[in-house]
Image (cartoon, helix red, strand yellow):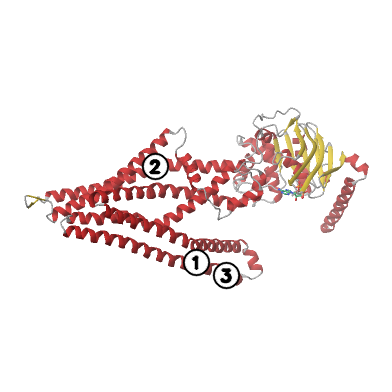
């Protein structure tokens, strides 16, 4: 099993994964088609197999009835030299029609019985993958390409669907049919007929697979150029404004056309190679058919076979050749389906980086005291981020973390939320090491307002209520009021039902932040992590919301990360972080007295504030 390390991600999302272990993939799929404890589904599989065999047996019976009718009509089957009454051939023709219908109906019944098994397997696989993706670490999700990942799932489910449809209901029945028809030839017409038929089929299959393998490169090229052309077109349309700014319409069109031209070249080559495949297949089939029919005609001439038997040879051969028409396509698609499925199973097999210990228990919080003891951490081993960081946040108090950009402030909150495990030291909450407790129980107790808020593409109400799916409307409104966003929402034409757009882009940065604060209030956590929670707000709104935040923080343990120092002057302790190390700590006034880094930061911000104030006054004048 692969760990979800960076190098593995790109591998899974590559287009040309070398899937050698197709049998293992089919076995994994079988586990879903033959699910443990689902006797109903298993009996469906068995029943559909029975119908599959019955349909094929009946299908083979059809040409026999036709041959008998031909014999009677040509006077081959006579009683004492007189032709049997016309009712007999008509009866046979009716029998022929009925058997044909039945053979087809059994095929349809087989599909109808199996569809539940197939759909159940598809649902289970898609759900398992989705659940597993949520189990994988933040590291995995930061390094993946969302588009690539959804394509893997989409293509794999399509692949499974195809595989089930064709493997079970095309390839297996055809093999069954070939075996039955070859045996009939052997028994009824002799070994040489069976041998020629078998030889012809083998060369047909060999030729088809060989040519399909050879022309795969044209198909790949076509797909590549198609993706490229699409990518270019989408990128160009996304950048609509930029194209206009630089009047680059012609440039964009010629770039698009270049990809289209490459696609057309590959498509033409692919079509020509398909023609070659089809002509070759036709040649082999006709060769085999002609050889066997000449022998059959000789047999008729020698009185060895009847005309009906001659017709039977032709009908049986056509019957096996027909499904083979699509062999090239089916072979190619099954191969692709196996590769696509393999990629998805590789995803499911990925080990989550952050795992609960076997004996992990639910975290129990009383005071909500947080302690970082000699914590060292890195995202990649060649670049340490936190260097021996130690601090304690007493239950119910607020600690602020300040420092230059990239110092490691947000990293502290990610570690506490256990998005990553530390390399040495310990992080405890009320004395329990966070690596010893269940992640889910820990995360339930922590509320995070992240630096960049991303919202679901749904209504404002849905996004706020995400903090507590069981919250009543009143609770949602209350949270929105505390986050100072209620009146804004009420003034919108659609109020709480307003859609926020993809990732929440229809709201301003400050509005998104307030929605994020409201949903965290609704979660009602014991520990609060506010990572620049008010950075996108104007100072007036920030001051208003500050009062709410302080109110919410009162009974909770809070870690507040902030650039604007005016928002954290009331914190019980302020930690100044620089390059992953704590360089100063104390409350606001103590830090100012030290006249160190914090003091300098404060001075600079004060000066900036004064300049801004003057500018505002000038503007007013
Ligand atoms: P800011 O004030 O700009 O938000 P910060 O102090 O919160 O900065 P962090 O987000 O903790 O900084 O990041 C600390 C360092 O770790 C940065 O230099 C950043 O480039 C790096 N870093 C953050 N996330 C990752 C990641 N997933 N993989 C690798 N490096 C990362």
* Residue under pointer 3: 253
Q: Earlier in the sequence, mark 3 or mark 1?
A: 3
Q: Earlier in the sequence, mark 2 or mark 3?
A: 2
Quarter holding residue 236? bottom right
| SS at circle 3 | helix
547 vs 349, left or right, is right
Q: Are marks 2 and 3 in contact (CB under 8 Å)?
A: no
Residue at 66% x, 30% y: name it. 360
* Residue under pointer 1: 266
Q: Position of residue 251 (x, y in %)?
A: 61, 71
The numbered mark at residue 369 is none
Q: Earlier in the sequence, mark 2 or mark 1?
A: 2
Residue at 54% x, 45% y: name it. 345
Distance in Å between CA atoms under marks 3 and 1:
20 Å
Whether the residue under disc 2 has CB within 8 Å of ligand 1 = no
| SS at circle 2 | helix
């Amino acid at each position: 099993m692969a760990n979800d390390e960076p190098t593995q991600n790109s591998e899974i999302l590559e287009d040309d994964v070398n899937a050698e272990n197709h049998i293992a993939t089919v076995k994994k799929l079988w586990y879903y088609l033959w699910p443990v404890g689902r006797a109903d589904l298993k009996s469906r599989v068995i029943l559909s197999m029975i119908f599959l065999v019955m349909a094929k047996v009946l299908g083979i019976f059809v040409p026999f009835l036709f041959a008998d009718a031909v014999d009677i009509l040509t006077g081959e089957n006579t009683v004492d030299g007189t032709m049997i009454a016309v009712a007999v051939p008509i009866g046979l023709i009716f029998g022929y029609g009925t058997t044909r219908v039945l053979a087809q109906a059994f095929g349809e019944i087989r599909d109808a019985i199996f569809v539940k098994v197939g759909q159940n397997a598809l649902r289970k696989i898609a759900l398992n993958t989705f659940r597993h993706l949520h189990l994988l670490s933040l590291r995995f999700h930061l390094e993946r390409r969302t588009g690539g990942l959804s394509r893997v799932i989409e293509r794999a489910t399509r692949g499974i669907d195809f595989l089930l449809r064709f493997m079970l209901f095309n390839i297996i029945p055809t093999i069954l049919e070939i075996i039955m028809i070859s045996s009939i030839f052997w028994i009824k017409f002799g070994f040489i007929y069976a041998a020629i038929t078998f030889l012809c089929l083998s060369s047909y299959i060999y030729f088809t697979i060989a040519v399909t393998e050879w022309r795969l490169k044209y198909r790949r090229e076509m797909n590549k150029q198609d993706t490229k052309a699409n990518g270019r077109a989408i990128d160009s349309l996304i950048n609509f404004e930029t194209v206009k700014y630089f009047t680059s319409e012609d440039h964009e069109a010629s770039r698009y056309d270049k990809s289209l031209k490459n696609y057309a070249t590959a498509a033409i080559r692919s079509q020509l190679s398909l023609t070659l495949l089809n002509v070759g297949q036709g040649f082999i089939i006709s060769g085999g058919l002609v050889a066997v029919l000449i022998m059959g005609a000789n047999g008729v001439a020698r009185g060895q076979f009847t005309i009906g038997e001659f017709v039977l040879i032709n009908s049986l051969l056509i019957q096996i050749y027909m499904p083979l028409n699509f062999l090239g396509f089916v072979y190619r698609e099954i191969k692709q389906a196996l590769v696509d499925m393999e990629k998805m199973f590789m995803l499911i097999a990925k080990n989550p980086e952050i795992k609960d210990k076997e004996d992990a228990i639910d975290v129990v919080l009383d005071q909500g005291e947080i302690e970082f003891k000699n914590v060292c951490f890195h995202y990649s081993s060649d670049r340490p981020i936190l260097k021996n960081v130690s601090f304690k946040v007493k239950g119910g108090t607020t600690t602020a973390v300040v420092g230059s950009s990239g110092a490691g402030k947000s990293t502290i909150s990610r570690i506490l939320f256990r998005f990553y495990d530390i390399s040495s030291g310990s992080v405890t909450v009320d004395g329990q090491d966070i690596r010893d407790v269940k992640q889910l129980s820990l995360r339930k107790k922590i509320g995070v307002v992240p630096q960049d808020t991303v919202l679901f593409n749904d209504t404002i109400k849905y996004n706020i209520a995400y903090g507590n799916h069981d919250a009543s409307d009143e609770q949602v409104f209350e949270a929105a009021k505390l986050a100072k966003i209620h009146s804004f929402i009420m003034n919108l034409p659609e109020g709480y039902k307003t859609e926020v757009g993809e990732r929440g882009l229809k709201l301003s940065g400050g509005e998104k932040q307030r929605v994020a604060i409201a949903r965290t209030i609704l979660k009602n956590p014991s520990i609060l992590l506010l990572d620049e929670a008010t950075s996108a707000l104007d100072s007036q709104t920030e001051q208003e919301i500050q009062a709410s935040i302080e109110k919410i923080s009162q009974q909770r343990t809070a870690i507040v990360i902030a650039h604007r120092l005016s928002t954290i002057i009331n914190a019980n302790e302020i930690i100044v972080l620089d390059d992953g190390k704590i360089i100063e700590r104390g409350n606001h006034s103590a830090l100012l007295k030290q006249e160190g880094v914090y003091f300098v930061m404060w001075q600079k911000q004060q000066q900036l504030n004064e300049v801004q104030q003057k500018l505002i006054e000038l503007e007013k004048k």
